[in-house]
Amino acid sequence: MHINTMRAGLERGEAQIGTWLTMVRNPAILSLMKSAGLDFARVDMEHTGLTIEHIADLAVLARALDFPIAVRPPKANREWITRLLDVGVWNLHCPQVENAEHAREIVAASRYAPWGLRGNGGLSAATDFDFSVPLMERRAHANRQVFVTVMFETAKAFDDLDEIAAMPGIDALTVGPADLAQDMGVAGTPEQGKALDEKRDLILAAARKHGKVAAMLVASFEEMTRWKNAGATLLAYSSDADILHSGYRAAMTRIKGGG
């Protein structure tokens, strides 16, 4: 049975560095990213046109390459969690987690008993199309491989931070910086950086306290170094769209500007 190499790396204490996949739909992008030295790709369904069919194609190749994808669904509910897990996704990046009750629902949907009540699918990519392994062994293996990150995107969500961080089945904590800044009323103001850093520090402290992973989105080498040194081990650098845009813009500036 395949293993989730992102989880395995984190459990060894190795930082896992990936990027957001928001635009490129060709599954071959995963081969390119692995060749470039990335550890995983985080695929966004919440703010893109990527469909469950695209995710299914990516998930099968991700397993074959041992280059995991993490998927942010449009909504962190049982319907989306079940479908993503059953097409072969192991890593869930759950948006807009508002309270401990929502976190418990996520755990229940993502793990088989006794952790939760994940729905039971048939022969599929999620089982590597292999039923030779006994049922309960397959389920126990699936429970070990699934990795759930929850996103705190409102100030109120932090009321339940400690309870959520302590919850079995919640593996990593992070902030959604843009939505959180909007909710706190600091988006685009001089106070935004400081206000978000205070929330990131709360995430780091809760992760340390409860033995969970702190995840961070970073946009530069300096940010990567800062948050990695602070204890974040699951790091997403930029995105496919940003990397392509900045690369082409730099090239065109030089070519057209004669530099």
Image (cartoon, rainbow, N blue to C red):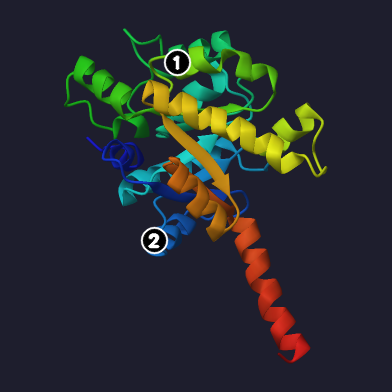
Q: Where is residue 10 in the image (x, y as percent from the top left)?
A: 33, 39
Task: Residue under label 1, please give it.
Answer: 107
Front residue of 157/69: it is 157
Q: Where is residue 249 in the image (x, y as percent from the top left)?
A: 71, 73
Graded by Cα atoms within 10 Å as few (under 14), some (14 to 19) or many (20 or more), the crowding at tag 2 reads: few
Q: Position of residue 57 (x, y in %)?
A: 46, 44
Front residue of 170/125: it is 170
Query: Which quadrant, please, contains the N terminus?
Result: top left
Q: Where is residue 112 in the image (x, y as percent from the top left)?
A: 35, 14
Q: Which amino acid does label 1 sit on?
A: Val
Residue at 62% x, 19% y: name it: 158
SS category of the residue bearing label 2: loop
Task: Residue under label 2, please give it.
Answer: 37
Quadrant of residue 252 within the rendered picture: bottom right
Q: Is residue 62 above or below residue 81?
A: below
Front residue of 7/23: it is 7
